[in-house]
Image (spheres, helix red, strand yellow):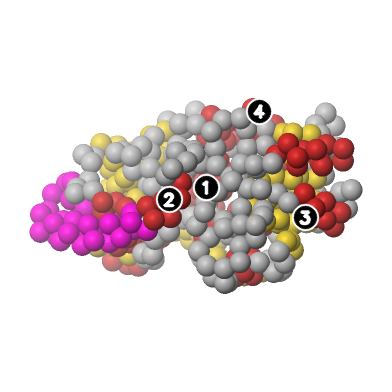
Amino acid sequence: MPRLPAALEPAFPLVKRAHRAATRSTGRATRRLAAASPGPRRLPATGTESSLLTARLEPDAVTYHPAGPAQHVDRGVAVGWPADHPVFRARRTSDVPARFVLDIADGTVVGTYAAHITPGGILDYETSDYFGIKGWKEHPLYLRPRLPEAEYVDGTVASLGTRGTYGNYYHALFDMIPRWGILQDAMPGVVPDVLYANRNTRFSRELLEMIGLGDVPALEPTKHACYRARRLLVPSQPNYGNTAPPDTIDWLRTHLPATRRTDLPKRIYVSRGAGRNTRRVNNEDEVLAVLKPLGFEVFDPGAVSVREQHDQFATAEAIVAPHGAALTNLVFASPGAKVLEFFAPRYVETVYWAITSQLPDVTYRYLLGRPYDTRPAGAPMDRVMEDITVDLDDLRIALEDLGLH
């Protein structure tokens, strides 16, 4: 995530809330306009929360292909400081919907968020979800007065894109790449003519190459992209609610196998890099002064290939890092690995615990920076860009607890 100007960072939560409110109010007007003004560029006048319902409403154009059953995930108790943090407590369990592919004749896909629309004008929200909203009526598609002019593709397009994949490694690895596996499970032998998938970053191109899609033609999901395909195949969300479902973890570890190497460090501190960024560790030099005598080496994922990132995380026996997308590589951690993740006091996110909790014999700990958040449980975790100050005594206690002393 790029860093905003310092003066604007405190306003980020307000901007997000204002964006959602604007979508609701603007959407009421743009949907009325769509209903009253039919045409090829009109917005979808309605939507569904369920792809099964979408298929039932347009049976002549939409087919639902099952790929796998729903799952219940129980992660147990997260351990860290301060103990029993309410965000971790609230996410001990989750229910993951069934996997599927939605097969849409004359379907349309729009934008970086990959909104999927039927020929009858239904926004299928289950395959088009977006950050921090509740339902299809709040989708940012409705901030537009009308759709961009669509380019027709006379062939089969497989949509692997979704919100966040335009420039974020976590979403590329967990939300984009495993969609290919869902498509293969639901429709064995089907080969699309074109992908709707991000290739705008080096890591996205490398990941697509690693699963054998490097040479498949691709349409880039840009802000104003709009494609209408003779046949649009839309795999379901493989990382529903950022829960890292077991099927997705297994697929990634199987199809992107990492190698434990003897030439890579066994203990690493994952740096946020030298460029402008968020969630940096304010006292990183002091943290490194504690870690380096224990055998830790600094690892900058942005300086190496995706394959080397995977191999480094598979090789590491101990991983210490501030919260950030590089920790997505924990999916390749080997049995016995120990992980310590730093958070800012008012931004705690459980996505990497969700991954490690389902890996064999991987020990995870979290550590909040100081000063601790004293607000009551349930207070918004809205300082997504805030930097982290690690208490060194807390750090030493956490390392000792992990046996890294």
The kind of residue tagged 4 is Val
Residue annotated with mark 2:
12
Q: What is the CA distance from the residue labelled 4 to the residue labelled 3? A: 31 Å
> Residues at badges 1 and 2 in contact (C-beta under 8 Å)?
yes
Name the residue located 61 percent from the left edge and 30 percent from the top edge.
274
Choose the circle earlier in sequence order: 1 or 3: 1
Choose the circle earlier in sequence order: 1 or 4: 4
The magenta stretch spans residue 39: yes
Instruction: Give the magenta part as a residue range.
Output: 16-45
Label 1 neighbour load within 10 Å: few <14, some 14-19, many 20+: many
The kind of residue tagged 3 is Asp
Residue annotated with mark 1:
385
Q: Which mark is residue 304?
A: 4
Report x, y in % for residue 180: 52, 45
Q: What is the CA distance from the residue labelled 1 to the residue labelled 4? A: 25 Å
The answer to which quarter of the image holds residue 316 is top right
Residue annotated with mark 3:
394
The kind of residue tagged 1 is Met
Q: What is the CA distance from the residue labelled 1 to the residue labelled 2? A: 8 Å
Q: What is the CA distance from the residue labelled 1 to the residue labelled 3? A: 22 Å
Q: Is mark 2 on a helix, strand or loop?
A: helix
Name the residue located 87 percent from the left edge and 41 percent from the top edge.
294
Q: What element carries label 3?
A: helix
Q: Is residue 69 above or below residue 41?
A: below
Choose the circle earlier in sequence order: 2 or 3: 2
The answer to whether residue 282 is seen in the rendering is yes
Query: Nearer the observer, disc 1 or disc 4?
Result: 1
Circle count: 4
Considering depth in this image, is 81 or 341 the residue closer to the camera? 81
Query: Nearer the observer, disc 4 or disc 2?
Result: 2
